[in-house]
Image: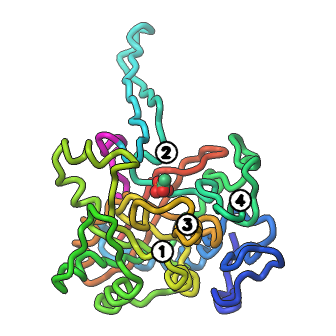
Amino acid sequence: MATTINFKKLPKFKQLPIKKGAPPESSWGVFGKDDELGCLNLLTPRGIVEAAKLVRKGKVFRLDTPINYAKPPLFNRNPARHTILSFEQYGLLGHDDSIDNYNTQEGSQWDGLGHVGHVRHHAYYNGVTDDQIQDGPGGKLSIHKWANKFVGRGVLIDVCRYLEKKKRPLDPFAASVYSLKDIQDALKAQGTKVKAGSILLVRTGWLGAYLKASDEQKKAMAPLEALQSCGIESSSAMVEWLWDNRFAAIGTDCPAVEAWPWDFRDEGALHYRTLSLLGLPLGEQFVLDDLAADCAADKHYEFMLVSVPMNLEGGIASPPNAVAIK
Ligand code: UVW
């Protein structure tokens, strides 16, 4: 991790790529030819010290859903099986847990940079090839490399509340899109200043609506082929804004950050633009409602964000294991 970074010296989006032969609009090479952290390089020790100063009232907000919260999990992912094991046979009154069949993306999650490679360039962030994504400590773009990197200033944009106030709410259960302008307008209305090296959280209202849905509705929307959900615009202008504001990651409370379904053949999809081209982590199904209510009440939309992804060598994704502290 760099002690400090000269944000002004980083190329602007329009100057990308800087590496010969790299795909257009990619940051490949910006953080070094063998870099595996992408935009997490923007989280620096100085940024962590600044983030700690945002802790003013000692309130902690858990950003993860409970394991197996979605019944059934979305996108045809399998539920985890939790078994409590007894030590009775050894004469000890006590227990262990066993979690089988655990999919790191069954609930709140960071998509690691090995989650999605680019449809046309057939490569992952920084040119990593498919055979380099593998189990174990040598696995490229592994989630365990993030385990002590994901701490810094968090900023919430509550675009859902903003559009509700404007009497233009979006349907969370349709493939409806929060535009870049909606997000910028919400930010302006909040009076929040974006600082380089922040972790951005965007509240879309999807998770709150999901939690209120009936068991039948949840069952009907779980399959990948049936799910429809809101998300943010996936344009080049959106990633230009994310890159030029030097965001280190973006997390949302909806299933795919961008609206679902997105077409895997569409190279304009946000998953490709962010994970594969910019090395920008995507967070999904984050718990943001309590944090958002607190931000609306005290008008402070910035906080310290601490996320400790799983130390899974070769891992593809992870529950964020995250808290926002105000
Ligand atoms: C897909 O887009 C398929 O998965 P996720 O949204 O979890 O990255």
Q: Say which of 95 and 35 sits in front.
A: 35
Q: Quadrant of the C terminus?
A: bottom left
Q: Nearer the viewer, mark 2 or mark 3?
A: 3
Question: Is tag 1's residue or tag 3's residue first in the polypeptide sequence?
Answer: 1
Q: Say which of 314 and 238 sits in front.
A: 238
Residue wearing tag 4: 122
> Is 74 above or below relative to 278?
above
Chain part drawn in magenta: 61-72
The residues bearing labels 2 and 3 have C-alpha atoms spaced at a distance of: 25 Å
Q: Quadrant of the N terminus?
A: bottom right
Residue 250 position in % (x across, y down): 48, 70
Q: Quadrant of residue 21?
A: bottom right
Mark 1 touching mark 2, by CB under 8 A?
no
The residues bearing labels 4 and 3 have C-alpha atoms spaced at a distance of: 13 Å
Q: Which mark is residue 234?
A: 1
> Is 74 above or below relative to 184?
above
Residue wearing tag 2: 104
Instruction: Specify the amino acid type for callout 1.
Output: Ser
Instruction: Specify the amino acid type for callout 3.
Output: Asp
Crowding at label 4, few (<14), some or many (≥20) Cα neighbours within 10 Å? few
